[in-house]
Amino acid sequence: MNPAAPRPRLVIVDGVPMSALVTEVEDPQAVIVAIHGGGTTAMYFDCPGHPSYSLLRTGAAAGFTVVALDRPGYGSSAPYPEAMVSGEQRVNLAYGAVDRILGERPRGAGTFVWGHSGGCELTLRLAADARGADLLGIELAGTGRHYHPAAKEILKTATRERRPSGMRELLWSPEQSYPPEVLNGATVSPSAPAYEDQMVSNWARQTFPELAPDVRVPVHFSIAEHEKVWQADDAAVTEVGALFTGAPRFVVHRQPDAGHNISLSHAAPIYHSKVLEFVRDCVAERSAKTQSDLEAG
């Protein structure tokens, strides 16, 4: 199957325009909602010039409808900061956008949410929300509980308006792991939402440990070999896994030859394939449960 070309979509949710890139298949196994991190857009999941690196295209070729949202405050929603101050507002915007984009189209076994870096905050909020119990599962990549000491020194002076020296080294090394187009800024967003500074500040010490126990679906946690923002040794990853007390499964994947921005790296095809295997497992589990419920009923 040839990878489908992503289509831009724009829908209105509570008066806010929400934009996305979408690849649809007629009879999907499931829907994957992909949520990018800070300083980029939905294009993070459609690597420029490298279709085989694109989650949007790879996911569709594998039989999934993929919706890569511009996270609230990015893309078309950027001029509406008052509509996304709280986590609850952002969750409602995201769920509303997906519902309006898909409408009555088939969703297969359900929805899987795939978050990267700063997008893990919204991913976790979506999963911890009451509606999150119906998700197939979630993927978290490029995040953690504790910063690398060197990263902490750099990030403590970073804001959405100021990127200190050293940020490129944290996010884009080793350079040989990425295509030149990506290193030249092809996926960079020109702006970031006002709420993001506080969101980033609260994430590791407050939001992550508060929300993780409320997740009731399988969790896949991916770590790039050259991750320089977050501590990712075995002890750090064990600490993350221990937060998900309500999740039926917590699966760790370490991706060789990749840096922080894993879906834009040369390792993206292998990484995406690995997580798509997990999504298929979640689909199979949901289908088996549905069949069991029908037989019991």
Image: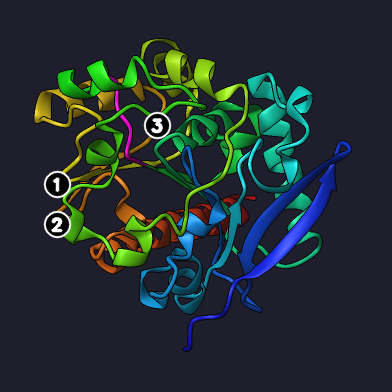
Give the structural element (helix, strand or loop) at label 2: loop
Residue 146 image position (x, y, % from top left): 25, 19
In the rendered image, which residue does mark 2 sit on?
Answer: 257
The image quarter containing residue 271 is: bottom left
Spatial CA distance of label 1 from label 2 is 6 Å
Q: Residue at x 24, y 16 (%)?
A: 153
The image quarter containing residue 81 is: top right
Amino acid type at image mark 1: Glu
Q: Nearer the viewer, residue 166 or 82?
A: 166
In the rendered image, which residue does mark 1 sit on?
Answer: 225
In the displayed structure, does residue 15 sit left or right of residue 63? right
Magenta: main secondary structure: loop
In this view, the residue farthest toward the left is 234
Spatial CA distance of label 3 from label 1 is 25 Å
Amino acid type at image mark 2: Asp
In the rendered image, which residue does mark 3 sit on?
Answer: 247
Residue extent of the magenta highlight: 141-146
Q: Is residue 144 magenta?
A: yes
Whether tag 1 and tag 2 are in contact, CB under 8 A, the answer is yes
